[in-house]
Amino acid sequence: MEVQLHTTEKNGYFYIEVDGVMQAQMTFVFAGSERIIIDHTEVQPGNEGKGYGKKMVSAAVDYAREKHIKIIPLCPFAKSVFDRVPEFRDVL
């Protein structure tokens, strides 16, 4: 299971599909050309504890590093992952 990314000019989302059905999604908006704001993370019922949320945050960190941008985690879940995983903090 791989985290996928969809973007538009203004915003985007990371998501996980299982058998063609979206099971988790983390949305963000672009704040200028140098940062994204993660504003919401949602995991469908029954998927708790599978690590989907952390996988999406990890994908966002990889994306930020690749694009040389920063992340502002307004979403409480995403912020909690950054608080627990020091290796991700270089993109804050």
Image: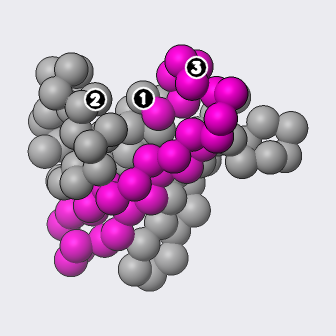
The residue depicted at 44 percent of the width and 58 percent of the height is 27
Residue under label 1, please give it: 54
Quadrant housing the N terminus: top right
Residue 81 figure quarter = top left
In this rendered view, identify the residue nearer to me: 52 or 5: 52
Judge whether residue 87 can be spotted in this image.
no
Residue under label 3, please give it: 50
Residue 27, magenta (yes or no): yes
Range shown magenta: 24-53
Circle 1 packing at 10 Å, graded few (<14), some (14-19), many (20+), is some
Q: Secondary structure at mark 2?
A: helix
Q: Position of residue 61 (x, y in %)?
A: 32, 40
The residue depicted at 42 percent of the width and 29 percent of the height is 54
Where residue 42 is drawn, which disc sits there?
none
Q: Secondary structure at mark 3?
A: loop
Residue 32 figure quarter = bottom left
Amino acid at circle 3: Lys
Residue 35 figure quarter = bottom left
In this rendered view, identify the residue nearer to me: 68 or 58: 58
Amino acid at circle 1: Lys
